[in-house]
Image (tube, rainbow, N blue to C red):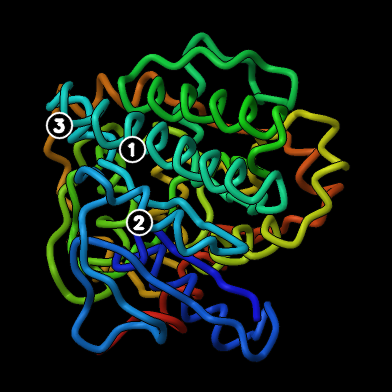
């Protein structure tokens, strides 16, 4: 029986992933799905729930001792919080990954090399920093300009090295900003990208903290869940030891986002967006990439939406509650 562990299983993406695994039966029908996180929704996704802190002593060892076949590592401090709280960002976003990798190495060694799990890591396009070309291709250097991006980039390198040594079979997915996120805004600097769509659709005012000329790279939470399960089943020999992949998505400006909202929900929804500049968010977003050419990922079968209107429709189908 395949054992799947989702670290960060109580969060938005972890819940999407668990629902997707259950609905699509992307693994064997009798697969065991375990979810580990600080907290969980009251009526959450199916799976064996364990409440705990991945940053707590021995948490990584206890999880690795279960010897799951597939591990999705999604737990993280989000970008804005990682920038505001330097120590917390590095402790959670890097040192927990280090502890998990070492715990998995211990299990690998204890089985004389028989145990080598697939580890799928949720990385981010924040690993790239300005100045950017018009479109970032698969050869562009990784040079983050935020603490969050640096933490994700360092984790990618560790996963590649532990994979090279044969302790794990890892792959890092550089996810676009996931939009439209359900629920309430979080501490991520990118939260407003979802807020300016989600709140008006729900009849609420939304704050736009940047100029509408800002361009960014997006995919839906549904697409992200599919990225993750596809990576879990991918033949990693096809990666040629380059174990970090830029995921496909949609490049659009905030103005184009708003125009897509107008097309789907009308001018009344657009009127609920209020421009209130925030210099801190403007500074962070200025250092983020805007567009990608994801040939490697597309050749390996990863797929996203084809327009921002499609992304809004996914939210309406999956998460909107009138």
Classify 80 as above or below 194.
above
Q: Secondary structure at mark 1?
A: helix
Say few, some or many: other residues with alpha carbon within 10 Å of mark 1 (under 14 / 14 to 19 / 20 or more): many
- CA separation in Å, label 1 and label 2: 13 Å
Classify 91 as above or below 221.
above
Q: Quadrant location of the C terminus?
A: bottom left
In the rendered structure, find residue 62 and report the number of the disc placed on it: 2
Q: Which residue is mark 3?
A: 277
- CA separation in Å, label 1 and label 3: 35 Å
Please name the residue shown 21% across and 53% down the image: 53
Please name the residue shown 56% across and 23% down the image: 157
Q: Position of residue 274 (x, y in %)?
A: 15, 49
Q: Quadrant location of the N terminus?
A: bottom right
Question: Is residue 171 shown left or right of residue 123?
Answer: right
Question: Is residue 247 shown left or right of residue 188?
Answer: right
The quadrant where residue 25 appears: bottom right
Q: Which residue is mark 1?
A: 96
CB atoms of marks 2 and 3 within 8 Å: no
Which is nearer the eye, 75 or 183?
A: 75
The mark that comes first in sequence, 1 or 2, is 2
């Amino acid at each position: 029986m395949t054992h799947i562990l989702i670290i960060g299983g109580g969060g938005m993406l972890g819940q999407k992933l668990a629902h997707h695994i259950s609905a699509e039966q992307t693994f064997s029908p009798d697969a065991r799905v375990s979810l580990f996180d600080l907290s969980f929704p009251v009526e959450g996704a199916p799976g064996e729930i364990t409440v705990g802190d991945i940053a707590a002593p021995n948490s990584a060892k206890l999880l690795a001792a279960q010897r799951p076949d597939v591990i999705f590592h999604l737990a993280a401090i989000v970008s804005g919080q990682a920038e505001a709280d330097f120590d917390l960002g590095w402790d959670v976003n890097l040192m927990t990954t280090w502890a998990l990798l070492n715990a998995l190495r211990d299990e690998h060694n204890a089985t004389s090399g028989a145990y080598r799990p697939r580890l799928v890591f949720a990385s981010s396009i924040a690993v790239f920093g300005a100045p950017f070309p018009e479109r970032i291709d698969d050869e562009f250097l990784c040079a983050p300009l935020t603490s969050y991006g640096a933490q994700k980039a360092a984790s990618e390198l560790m996963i590649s090295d532990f994979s090279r040594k044969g302790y794990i079979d890892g792959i890092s997915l550089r996810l676009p900003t996931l939009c439209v996120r359900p629920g309430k805004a979080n501490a991520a600097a990118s939260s407003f990208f979802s807020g300016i769509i989600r709140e008006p659709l729900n009849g609420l005012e939304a704050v736009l903290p940047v100029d509408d000329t800002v361009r960014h790279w997006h995919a839906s939470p549904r697409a992200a869940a599919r990225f993750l399960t596809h990576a879990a089943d991918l033949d990693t020999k096809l990666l040629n030891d380059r174990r970090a992949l830029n995921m496909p998505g949609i490049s659009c400006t905030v103005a184009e986002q708003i125009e897509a909202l107008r097309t789907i929900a009308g001018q009344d929804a657009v009127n609920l967006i209020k421009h209130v500049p925030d210099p801190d968010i403007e500074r962070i977003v200025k250092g983020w990439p805007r567009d990608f050419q994801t040939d490697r990922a597309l050749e390996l079968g990863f797929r996203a939406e084809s327009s921002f209107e499609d992304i809004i429709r996914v939210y309406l189908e999956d998460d909107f509650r009138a």
